[in-house]
Image: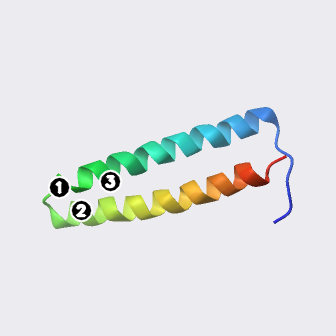
Amino acid sequence: MAKKELAMHEKLEVHEVLLFKTSCATKSTAMLELVEDSELKKLLKDDIKNSSKAIEELKEILKNAK
C-alpha cells in the first residue's frame, strides 16, 4: 500500500475514530457475558467482529500515513 500524506487534523480524526471503535468493542465484549437474549447476543458478536475489522483498518491507515 502506498503511503499517503495526511494532514495533522486528519491523523487526529482517524485516531479519535480508532479510540471510539476500541471503546465500542470493549463495551460490547463486556456486555456479551451479561446478555441472555440470543438475538441481542448475535448483534453484540456482529458488532465486535465489525469493530475489530474497523480497528485493524484504522491502525493500517495511521501506520501508512506520513
Q: Quadrant of residue 17?
A: top right
Is label 2 in contact with label 1 (beta carbons under 8 Å)? yes
Residue designated by label 3 = 29
**Residue 19 - label:** none
Horizontally, residue 66 falls left or right of residue 55, namely right
> Looking at the picture, how far across and down is residue 29, in whole percent?
32, 53
Residue 41, label in figure: 2
Q: Please name whichever residue, 63 or 36, is drawn nearer the observer in this view of the structure.
A: 63
Q: Quadrant of residue 7?
A: top right
The image position of residue 22, as x and y in percent, is 48, 46
Q: Nearer the viewer, mark 3 or mark 1?
A: 3
Q: Secondary structure at mark 2?
A: helix
Q: Position of residue 36 (x, y in %)?
A: 13, 59
Give the CA distance from mark 3 to mark 1: 10 Å
* Alpha carbons under labels 3 and 2: distance apart: 10 Å
Type of the residue with mark 2: Lys
At label 3, the amino acid type is Thr
Left or right placement of residue 25 versus residue 61 in this view: left
User: What is the total number of numbered labels drawn onto the structure image?
Assistant: 3
Kindly identify the residue that appears in the image at 80 percent across and 49 percent down: 65
Q: Give the mark, 3 or 1, whose residue is nearer the N terminus.
A: 3
Instruction: Give the structural element (helix, strand or loop) at label 3.
Output: helix
Q: Which residue is found at the position 18% from the left and 66% from the top?
A: 38
Residue at the image position 34 percent from the left and 46 percent from the top = 27
Q: Is residue 9 above or below residue 59?
A: above
Find disc 1 in the rendering and name its residue.
35
